[in-house]
Image (cartoon, grey):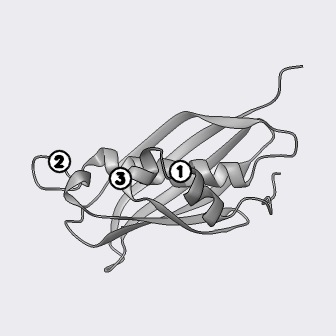
Amino acid sequence: MSILREDVTPEILNRDSKECLPGFLGIEMLEVKQGVMTSRMPVKSLHGAINGFLHAGSVVTLADTTCGNATIAHLPAGAQSFTTVELKSNHLGTAREGMVACTATAQHLGKTTQVWDAVVTDEATGKTIALFRCTQMILWPKT
């Protein structure tokens, strides 16, 4: 089982993603601990669809980013990186303002794969917006 790397912090992840998609969307990692990562994202017009609701892609990006950063924080010793090999989301609600929050929880922390579940909620009300699951393949240096 992979354990939390002490050299990966929310501050480092936020700094390193500033010029990437998560940075442009305003996604912020909040906390990382063994098997769990939390984050949030503001709800702005750029996160919406033309129907006035939060775009599913914005929600998926928040959940996938949170799970991906959690994977980085839990890479096994000697692993080089990771890549997402599968993801699924169920969208149950939306938000039109404020912040949406995400909590990713490890379901499997293996040597070759990790499986993460995430719940995206309206930060103010706690209402569930989406349920998300992804599988990450651990990448090892080529020998």
Q: Are marks 2 and 1 in contact (CB under 8 Å)?
A: no
Viewer-nearest residue: 50 or 135: 50
Measured in 3D between alpha carbons, the distance from the residue under mark 1 to the one under mark 3, in whole angstroms, is 17 Å
Which mark is drawn over residue 17?
1
The image shows residue 54 at horizontal and vertical percentages of 23, 55
Tag nearer the camera, 1 or 3: 1
Measured in 3D between alpha carbons, the distance from the residue under mark 2 to the one under mark 3, in whole angstroms, is 11 Å
Q: Residue at x 46, y 53 (%)?
A: 63
The image shows residue 18 at horizontal and vertical percentages of 49, 53
Which residue does the numbered mark 3 point to in the structure image? 59
Q: Quadrant of residue 62?
A: bottom left
Tag nearer the camera, 2 or 1: 1
Q: Amino acid at mark 2?
A: Ala
Q: Amino acid at mark 1?
A: Ser
Q: Amino acid at mark 3?
A: Val
Q: Residue at x 67, y 49 (%)?
A: 71
Q: Residue at x 24, y 61 (%)?
A: 44
Of the residues under marks 1 and 3, which one precedes in the sequence?
1
Which mark is drawn over residue 49?
2
Q: Residue at x 73, y 65 (%)?
A: 34
Q: Quadrant of residue 52?
A: bottom left
Check the image and name the residue furthest to the right: 143
Mark 1 residue element: loop
Q: Residues within 10 Å of mark 1 (few under 14, many from 20)?
A: some
Check the image and name the residue furthest to the bottom: 124
Q: Quadrant of the C terminus?
A: top right
